[in-house]
Amino acid sequence: MKTWKTCLALVLVLSLLLAAGCTPSKPNPTDPSKTNSTSAPSKNTDPKPSDSTNAPTGQKQKVPIGVAITLSGDNAETGRNFEAGMNIALQEIEEQGLLKDYELDLKIVDDQNDTTTSLNVVNEMIFNTKVKAIIGQIYSTNTLVTLPICNENGIPMLVPGLNPTFSQNGYDYFFRVCGTNEGGQTAGFEYFIKDLGLTKIGIISETSENGQTSYGIAKKIMGSYGLEFVCDENFTTGDKDFSTQVLKLKESGAQAVYTTAAATDAVVLLEQIRQVIGDDILVLANGASESNFLELAGPELAEGVLYYTVWTPALQDQKSVDFVQKYEAATGRQPADVSARGYDATWIIATALASMDGYDVNAADFSAKLADAIRNVDYTGLQGTFHYDDVGEAFYTMKLITYQDGEHVVVRDN
């Protein structure tokens, strides 16, 4: 009997020990290794981030923003001016404490003004760096191949290029941060035809896609006045000999000429125009707006050359004056219109983020929410007030500028 009772006691003790061993112990809150990290997260239906995804108190969420601009080759100066404008904006945003919940993390990459490199850069940004938006690209030929990728993947793209076709393809994630060639050319041709009464106008257009798009716009504007170009010539990027085009321009008796040439080509063409025709012809050149044009041409050759833009350092409003002073102090040179585009693009992103109330950067729909915030942004920058329409445009008119004694002077403000 005694043996039976002893055995029963042993069984009871073993049962209690086993039960104690199978009961999960509560994790020690001070020991991170005891937390249940493998359990599935609960579904959060609140549009704001749940407590588990909020940034820690006092710590801002970093928002990776891709910046694809040209920083090497013949057009590197344009990219550097764009970046310098962005840097001034970043400094002001920090000083003003605009972003309470976020920190801009700019991923600046050189697209080399090459379409293949641009594709690689943007794919890397979207699929590996996981950027939430992209600023770029300055040259339209590159944007034409990368904008569709951004749109397909729901990545907002703030574009500083002038090609008007960008907003004609139904892209939901496209936002332009400048004016368009159509608005600029309208200002130029209205000055020639309406203000000066000229009827003999020539054109020398680049054979690139962007050059031919500008050519088509120019033809349409001329047609609206019942006019045809008296000289209609083209060229290939990098050409050094414009003798044929310039001789035909002279023979046509043109009073003015419009060229789609970028800065480097525009200077070569302008030199040959002045040698053959002299100063008795007005020149409207796309490339004259670029930051390196005056340096390449020099004040004498640049004298009287026209270009169009939304912003110029010649503007005397207080915001522009302050920007020019900060820019010159930081870089030792005067800003170009592209500097204002970089400045405004950075401020637009920051203004949109400031309206998002700390929404979780890691949420699957963060970029979509950011696109909505950009679409509804109310921001007044160097170039004017940005209120985006349904196709991602903010401005349809531009100013006409000329060079006088090495300075930018406003000729017409549309």
Image (spheres, helix red, strand yellow):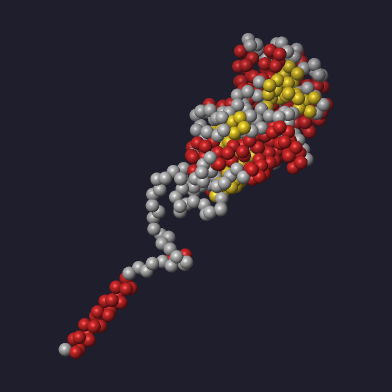
Residue at the image position 73 percent from the left and 39 percent from the top: 327
Q: Identify which residue, 399 or 262, lies in the foreground.
A: 399
Q: Position of residue 165 (x, y in %)?
A: 56, 27
Front residue of this view, candidates 414 and 240: 414
User: In this view of the protein, can residue 236 be seen by the observer?
Assistant: no
Q: Is residue 63 left or right of residue 16?
A: right
Which of 4 and 218 lies nearest the eye of the viewer? 4
Residue placed at 49% from the left, 51% from the top? Answer: 54
**In this picture, residue 194 sits left or right of residue 294:** left
347 vs 287, left or right, is left
Q: Is residue 358 left or right of residue 285?
A: left
Residue 259's quadrant in the figure?
top right
**Can residue 226 be seen in the rendering of this structure?**
yes
**Which image quadrant: the N terminus?**
bottom left
- Residue 274: horizontal and vertical position, in percent? 80, 22
Compared to residue 305, the image places residue 133 above or below, namely below
Q: Does residue 233 lie above or below 21 as drawn?
A: above
